[in-house]
Structure formats: structure tokens, C-alpha cells
Image (cartoon, helix red, strand yellow):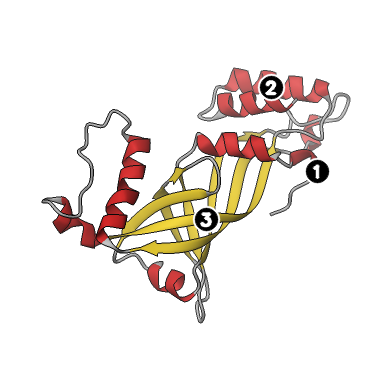
Amino acid sequence: MLIHPWDAAEDAEWRAWLSGHDFGQLIAGGTGRDLPVVTPAHFAFDGDRTIVTHLARPNPIWPLLAEHPRALLTVVDDYAYIRADWNTAPGADPAFGVPTSYYATVQLEGDVRLVDEPAAKAELLDKQLRHFEPDGSRAPVTAEDAPDRRLLPGIRGIEFTITGVRAKFKFGGNRTAEDRERIGTELAGRGGRLDAEALTQLRRRG
């Protein structure tokens, strides 16, 4: 991924952003494959270097992770299309403006540990449940009692240890304050699906 200096994220910046996200795409390649396997998944990030998730046992990613226990996890959000006329500098002809995209993304490289032992899987699932359902209405997962004892064999767990990060926050960092203010006004007026989130990033990074 191309990351210009003005789009690069600081360590604390990407960690704070990722801590507010819990859905991404797990990507793994393998010998003899033309393309990698890309699997959407919910996950829980501990804020430091560990992510946990789980997938159904028939998922095609398992043989690849067994062969080479490394993967990428990528998360993208806060994206918005910036129209050509918005992105045109004052005095230039907007008919020949160049549109662009604003977005935040974190791409994580990691070592993968497959979790198959029933008690360890139950513990991993509880970590995810505490993240997604902090009210605790779902009973703790157990490898010993029904119905969990019957259901656990249908999944496998993943402990993903972060070994490298590429983080990019592309929100007009190479434009003037005047340009960013003008684009921000347009985003606020359009009110598209993620325009408010992109606007927040634009102003935060300005």
C-alpha cells in the first residue's frame, strides 16, 4: 500500500482507531494458489498486539494457515468520495478537477496460532463475547456442558499476534488549510453514509 508521509499514522493514532473497530478481512495465501483466501470476520483487539477471532471449521482458509501460519488482517472505514469540483484549487477550472478518496485503513501482519483445544476455544470465545456483549447476558462458554460442548467442534479459534503494521489516514494532508475547510463544508452539506466520519478525520488531522 502506498503511504505518503502526510497520510502516515502514528502508533497511538492507529491503535486508538483500531480499538474502535472489530470487523475486517483476514487474508492468507498458500502454495499452488493463484489468489489468496479472503475471509470477513469479527474480531477483538486487546489494544496491544493480540487479536482473537474464530471461524467455521469448513472455512477454506484453514489449510493455508496450517501450511504457513502468517496472515494479513485489514480494516477500512471512514471513507468518502471527494468530487472533482470539491478537490479543485481556487482559481482552477473545476471541469478539469481531479477527484480523490478519503479513508482510514490499518493493515496488520501477524503470526497465527490455531486454537483447537476445547477449553482454550471456550476461553477465546469468552474474550470475544465480553467485547461484543459486555452486558454478560450470554452465559460463559464451557467445553464441558451442553450446548457448548456440542457446538465447539464446529469452529476453530485464531490468536493473531501483530508483527507489522501499515496504517494510512488519507484525509487531504497534502492540501492547504483553505482547501480542507472547503472540502469539509462540502462533506457536511452532502451528508452521505460516512461523510460525517470522514469529516471528523479531516478536521482532526488538520
The structure residue drawn at horizontal position 82% and vertical position 31%, both measured from the top left corner, is 175
The quadrant in which the N terminus is found is bottom right
User: In the rendered structure, which amino acid carries the disc numbered 3?
Assistant: Thr
Separation of residues labelled 3 and 2 (CA atoms)? 37 Å
Provide the secondary structure element on which disc 1 rests: helix
The structure residue drawn at horizontal position 31% and vertical position 34%, both measured from the top left corner, is 133
**Residues under numbered marks 2 and 1 in contact, where contact means CB atoms less than 8 Å apart:** no
Viewer-side label of 3, 2: 3
Query: Where does label 3 land, which residue?
Result: 161
The x, y position of residue 33, in whole percent, is 50, 77
The structure residue drawn at horizontal position 59% and vertical position 39%, both measured from the top left corner, is 15
Disc 1 crowd, CA 10 A, few/some/many (<14, 14-19, 20+)? few
Query: Where does label 2 land, which residue?
Result: 184
Separation of residues labelled 2 and 1 (CA atoms)? 21 Å
Q: Identify whether 44 is placed above or below 121.
A: above
**Residues under numbered marks 1 and 3 in contact, where contact means CB atoms less than 8 Å apart:** no
Q: Residue furthest right?
A: 91
Provide the secondary structure element on which disc 2 rests: helix
User: In the rendered structure, which amino acid carries the disc numbered 2?
Assistant: Gly
Query: Where does label 1 land, which residue?
Result: 5
Among the two numbered marks 3 and 2 on one chain, the one whose residue lies closer to the N terminus: 3
Among the two numbered marks 2 and 1 on one chain, the one whose residue lies closer to the N terminus: 1
User: In the rendered structure, which amino acid carries the disc numbered 1?
Assistant: Pro
The structure residue drawn at horizontal position 20% and vertical position 38%, both measured from the top left corner, is 139
Q: Identify whether 18 is placed above or below 134.
A: below
Residue 192 in the figure: left or right of residue 157: right
